[in-house]
Image (cartoon, rainbow, N blue to C red):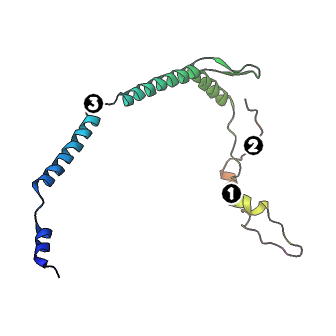
Amino acid sequence: MANPEPLRQIAHSRAPLSTWLGIVLLFALFGVIVLAIIGPSPRESDFEETRAKKRIENFKTLREEADKALTTYGWVDKNKGVARIPIERAMELTVADLAKQKPAPAGPIATAASAEGTAGKTEPQGTAAAPASPAPAPPSPAAQSSSPSVASPSPTKSP
């Protein structure tokens, strides 16, 4: 069998200086390549500035169109006779129209649960279903005399 001592010396011997020099030169070459690629490229990008300017111009155009639509007269659909009027004038006309109308009392409010409960149910023959909720009690005579009578709402013409 071979002497194990020379094998240990080979395994534990230091790498020659040329190997270390080769590794350092390899890293230096890599650094030079990276600098050559990245170096000439501009540090600031005009792309974002250009996009920002376009967005500002689009916003100004949109704002001008909206202001024009809100402040001028014009046809929406001339064939159907639909026109637009300035928003200020529309508010004046609406307030004047609402001032002419007499306030109508509110009717009973139907909740979604009561509408669903009575809409689709059918009773089988021979069974009587109990009401889901008791009927409201009529107001007492004292309450009727103290509160003004409210007439049922009459249909009104809408503009």
Residue visible at 71% across and 58% down?
A: 141
Give the number of the disc on residue 153: 2
Please tell me which of labels 3 and 2 falls first in the chain.
3
Disc 3 is placed on an element classified as loop
From mark 3 to mark 2, how far is it between C-alphas? 81 Å
Residue visible at 40% across and 28% down?
A: 52
Give the number of the disc on residue 112: 1
- Asked which quadrant contains residue 1, the reply is bottom left
Q: Which residue is mark 3?
A: 40
Residue 150 at x, y = what percent? Answer: 71, 46
For the record, the magenta segment spans 125-131
Which mark lies nearer to you, 3 or 2?
Answer: 3
Pointers 1 and 3 in contact (CB under 8 A)? no
Crowding at label 1, few (<14), some or many (≥20) Cα neighbours within 10 Å? few
Disc 2 is placed on an element classified as loop
The stretch drawn in magenta includes residue 127: yes
